[in-house]
Image (spheres, helix red, strand yellow):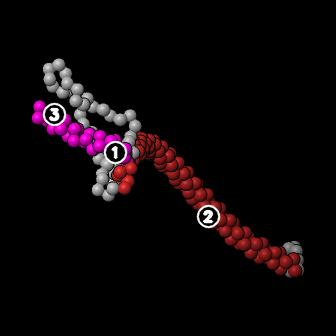
Amino acid sequence: MEVEEIYKHQEVKMQAPAFKDKKRGVSAKNQGAHDPDYENITLAFKNQDHTKDGHSRLTSQVPAQCRPPSDSTQVPCWLYRAILSLYILLALAFVLCIILSAFIMVKNAEMSKELLGFKRELWNVSNSIQACEERQKRGWDSIQQSITMVRSKVDKLETTLAGIKNIDTKVQKILEVLQKMPQSSPQ
């Protein structure tokens, strides 16, 4: 009960100057504009309605719209909404980054599998190229052996042919000598 009496007492004190101002015909706004000692103080009091059991009923009244700031140091209510909006946008950006990171990780896994497949295919192609090169090398080796064998045979033939030509020239000379000799007849 003491708290309620203090509130009632303060309410009566606050109403008294306003009543005097009404009597004088001067409004509080005009007085505050000219008097440097005057401060416009707005106090919010609890509802003083009493219930049947004698206790005061507490009701919370939230203004539907923000009041303009009465003090220059008070933060305007739209600023809270703007900051809340920024926090929501930040949270959405964070969620988007997480989703994009997950998407990148999935794509990275897929690409690494594809790269492993390409690596295997490249390895297979490389092995088959090496096998073909070895076959070609063996083929070229056998061809080169055949060529060297043919060359050696051709060289033998040339030497043989040169020998035959030598023999032929000697035979020719012998025939010429024999023809020049007088023929004697055996009688």
Residue mark closest to the camera, 2 vs 3: 3
In front of the other: 177 or 156: 156
**Which quarter of the figure is the N terminus placed in?**
top left
Residue mark closest to the camera, 3 vs 1: 1
Return the mark for residue 24.
1
In front of the other: 95 or 135: 95
| Residue 28 lies in the magenta-colored region | yes
Return the mark for residue 4.
3
Q: Amino acid at mark 3?
A: Glu
User: Between disc 3 and disc 1, whose residue precedes?
Assistant: 3
Residue 121: where, in percent of width, then height? 50, 45
Q: Amino acid at mark 1?
A: Arg
Would you call the spot at circle 3 few (<14 residues within 10 Å), some (14-19), or many (20 or more)?
few
Residue 167: where, in percent of width, then height? 74, 73
**Which quarter of the figure is the C terminus placed in?**
bottom right
Residue 86: where, in percent of width, then height? 41, 46
In front of the other: 98 or 115: 98
- Residue hosting label 2: 148
Q: Does residue 120 appear anywhere in the picture?
A: no
